[in-house]
Image (tube, helix red, strand yellow):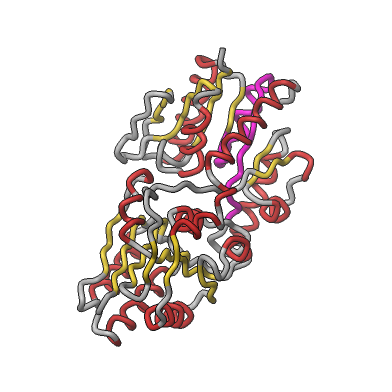
Amino acid sequence: MKKKLLIINGYEQFGYHTDTYNYCLYLYKDFSITFISPYLGLEKIVNEDINIKYIPQIKNRALRFIFKIIYIIFYTIVINPDIIFLKYFTGCSIIKKLFLNKKFVLDIRTSQVVGTLKEIRSYNNKILKESEVFENITIITDEVRKLLKIPEDKCNILPLGGKTLIKLEDDLNLDLDKKISLIYVGTFTRRRIIDTVKAFNKLSEKYNGENLEYKLIGFFENDIDEKMLLEEINKNQFNNIKYLGRVKNEELGKYFLESNIGVAFIPITEYFTNQPATKTYEYLFNGLFVIATSTIENQKVVNNKNGILIDDTEEAFYDALEYLYNNKVSFSRREIINTINNNSWENISLELGKYFNNILENNKR
């Protein structure tokens, strides 16, 4: 009989957080999975292999948190899982304290990367404090572990991954001399993506928009930033920028296939630089050449076989873009994918499954 695995994601709706969604896709054969997440009004992703429980959303923030905790407590009792995989959210240690006899894995995907220095340190200290009640912790990189000051002996590195969504029946080539087709996927909030749009507009004006296009896929957390970006997009006179908003992960393949350059423009700050970028992995796993800012984590995966590393400035992005526009270069999608293949979601998920089984076999809590 399969062991019962409860996955709790307190912030993102099922299917819209890449990591936990892919764990489900590859672990359901070995575990009976129940997934608890909030319902955020997005289209519900149906998966008959996963028992999905949606937390109804309440407008009042304090009541919403209380209801979330009660909801998780209720289904933890009803399901009685063998092991609980809990993606960190503020206050999550309450669940562990209420179920001391249950086997937990706390998952930490990120340190705090936005806000004032005081706010960042305060939030990171909160993560550290809450993590103290957990004996088993998965964390995205050892650099993030060191930043949060979590003891090494409690942690297992659970890296970022990716998967190929395009079809590779033929060895498709990226002929950048024929057309530059950029794509950005991910959150726009505090990523200064407007700098890339300004650089793209500048290049379009210089070359009359010829053989240039840019697709923007993602979302904002506030209306002010979105308004500023839309204003910059509207300055484009060639109609070669498409702002597509949210797109479900499984539907990104067609957009990757239409594109040849992925934009991984991440601010090079003390906190962003140690954070792996989902978008970088997504681009490379779908055979896209990348223009990536030179964060510590991007430096680990981007090289002259699959991309260009740049400073986090509008000027640096423009220079990289113009270089690629004027130099006839061609890359094999398959060869780009091969540079990153060890980090497939399938491999990572299977290792996570082994980690769960090791905890269950050794009666660790």
Which quarter of the rendered picture does the N terminus lie within? top right
Residue 241, percent across and down? 27, 69
Tell me the quarter of the picture where residue 221 sits: bottom left
Q: Quarter-wise, where is residue 263 in the image?
A: bottom left
| Residue displayed at 35% across by 76% down | 177
Q: Position of residue 14 (x, y in %)?
A: 41, 36
- Residue situated furthest bottom in the rendering: 206
Looking at the image, is 344 positioned above or below residue 74? Answer: below
The percent position of residue 347, horizontal first and vertical second, equals 58, 40
Q: Nearer the viewer, residue 115 or 252?
A: 252
The boundaries of the magenta stretch are: 86-112
The residue at 51%/65% (across/down) is 306
Residue closest to the eye, 252 or 193: 252
In the image, residue 184 sits, relative to residue 41, either above or below, namely below
The C terminus: image quadrant: top right
Q: Residue furthest top?
A: 1
Residue 195 x/y as whole percent: 41, 75
| Relative side of 136 to 3, left or right | right
Residue drawn at (51%, 29%) of the image = 69
Please state which of residues 201 and 280 is positioned toward the viewer in this rendering: 280
How many numbered discs sit on the rendered protein?
Answer: 0
Residue lying at 60% horizontally and 64% vertically, measured from the top left: 273
Inspect the magenta stretch and tell me whether residue 131 lies in it: no
**In the rendered structure, does residue 96 fall within the stretch colored magenta?**
yes
Residue 350 vertical position relative to residue 306 in the rendered view, above or below:
above
